[in-house]
Amino acid sequence: MPDFDRKHALISIADVDYAWLRDILVALHGGAPSNWAILCVCFKDDPVSLPPLDHHRKLFTSEGAGTMNMVEFFRDMSHGQVDVGASKVFGWYRLDRPRSDYVGNVYPQPGGKLNRNGLLDAAKAAATAAQVDLSKFDGVVVSGYGGTDLCGWLGGMAALCDANSLQPSLLGQEMGHGYGLDHARLNGSTADYQDPWDVMSTAAWPDRQAPNTDYVSIGPGLNAACMRSRGWLDEARVWSGPYAGFDTVITLRPLHHRQLSGYLAAEVGPYLVELRVRDRWDAAIPRAAVLVHRFADNHSYLMPASSGSEDLGEGEQFEFGSADHVFRPHVLVKVLDIDEGGRTARVRIGWRPQQFPPNYEIVGHLFGAVAVDGGGGIIVNGKFIPVPPRGPEYQLLSALSNALSSDITTSVVAGTSYKRDLLRQVVKCALQMQAELAEVTHSPPRRDTPQRRTREH
């Protein structure tokens, strides 16, 4: 439940190319302590006597070691790369505002009232006035007395919770928003909260939250695609084959059990494959299963099995493309068996990238006098098409030719990154052409075309 105002400002940028945001987040938070200041606040008309903050310290800091608190959550979800153990709890701070002044998720902020941004700012101001140096912390969690609100600021390292949401199941998502994680989705839909196996969909799937005597509920965990997007996935524990293709059988270990030897995930084309078993953060999932995800537009997408099941049990498979179409991409993930007690799954995985028939050209080489001035062109499927010596058409075709002719034989991770860079250049050139065409088709100000006047009258 990200904050609307700040969330959409970030998403509008991330939709163009989220990779730069991921790289910044990894640089700031990956592989280093990431400590939060927990600011406990109340309104001026709340009770005079407030509860001690022992429970907050147990939940958010290393004082709760071994209790499945937020320190353990981020340690497990980042494969040990994020340590929030030195977070500190401050308060109570009594705000000089009545509870009736809080209006929640309302933007812009009404005069004389506090919306979510206003409450965050008021809590920071109160802590600063009490001599808390917030610059020493990477993020801020505002914890309100009683029932107040619950949200996270996407990429803003800030979250808001209350007495009703002091649970890793809910805080994992809201604090996760702070690191830039967005809601998890189901393939084929842009609706949020559609992946019951992922913490970035909790609240919508309470049956997947495991009961906990200390914190009411915990889990589920974070999927491998989300972990990779933050730089949290241990890539040394990810199986990857040659970009040219493969068909093999591997053994997977549960994604969050890095203490076990073996692979914790597998990369198959644009997808990540993982095993989840019913314990710890995933104790409430219905069965041990293999999951397949892709990542796009800063969201993970759960890929259903060919049977329609959203998870893959023994004998089930996920397939993209067809093995019979020899020149088209093909992905196969088939679960051969799952040993939940032994914490293993044997999975057949296959990947075939896009192929082109011999002597088949989609785009040809630029030739003639194009490189100097005019008179050149390309051959597309045997047809000569003139190309100007410069401008967006020339840049687009050059970028597309580079993308299609790239020969990646290194690891899938490196190959995918290189391909993405080439395709970004193609998209950039295409968008430039689109912008120029859009400008041409605009009518002059206050001028209607004859066709438009005819339709209107």
Image (tube, rainbow, N blue to C red):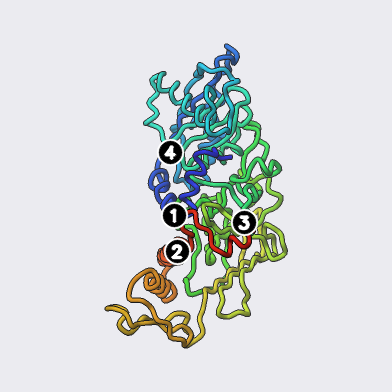
Q: Secondary structure at mark 4?
A: loop
Q: How far apart, in angstroms, are the residues tagged by discs 4 and 1?
A: 21 Å
Secondary structure type for disc 3: strand
- Horizontal side of 370 relative to 302 (left or right) equals left
Residue with the mark numbered 2: 440
Camera-near label (4 vs 1) is: 1
Disc 1 designates what residue?
Answer: 19
Residue 162 in the image: state x and y as whole percent.
Answer: 59, 28
- Label 4, on which residue? 34
Q: Earlier in the sequence, mark 4 or mark 1?
A: 1
Which mark lies nearer to you, 3 or 1? 1
Residue 409: horizontal and vertical position, in percent?
A: 42, 73
> Cβ–Cβ below 8 Å for labels 4 and 3?
no
Label 4 to label 2, Cα distance in Å? 50 Å
Instruction: Looking at the picture, tell me which residue is in the foreground, 161 or 82.
Output: 161
Mark 2 or mark 1, earlier in chain: 1
Disc 1: CA contacts within 10 A as few (<14), some (14-19) or many (>=20): some
- Quadrant in the rendering for residue 292: bottom right
Along the viewing direction, whichever of 437 and 19 lies nearer the viewer:
437
Label 4 close to label 1 by CB (< 8 Å):
no
User: Looking at numbered disc 2 in the image, what kind of residue is underneath it?
Assistant: Val
Residue occupying the point 51% across, 85% down: 357
* Left or right of 304 on screen, residue 182: left
Q: Which residue is mark 3?
A: 302
Please give left or right for residue 141 compared with residue 371 in the image.
right
Q: CA distance from mark 4 to mark 3?
A: 28 Å
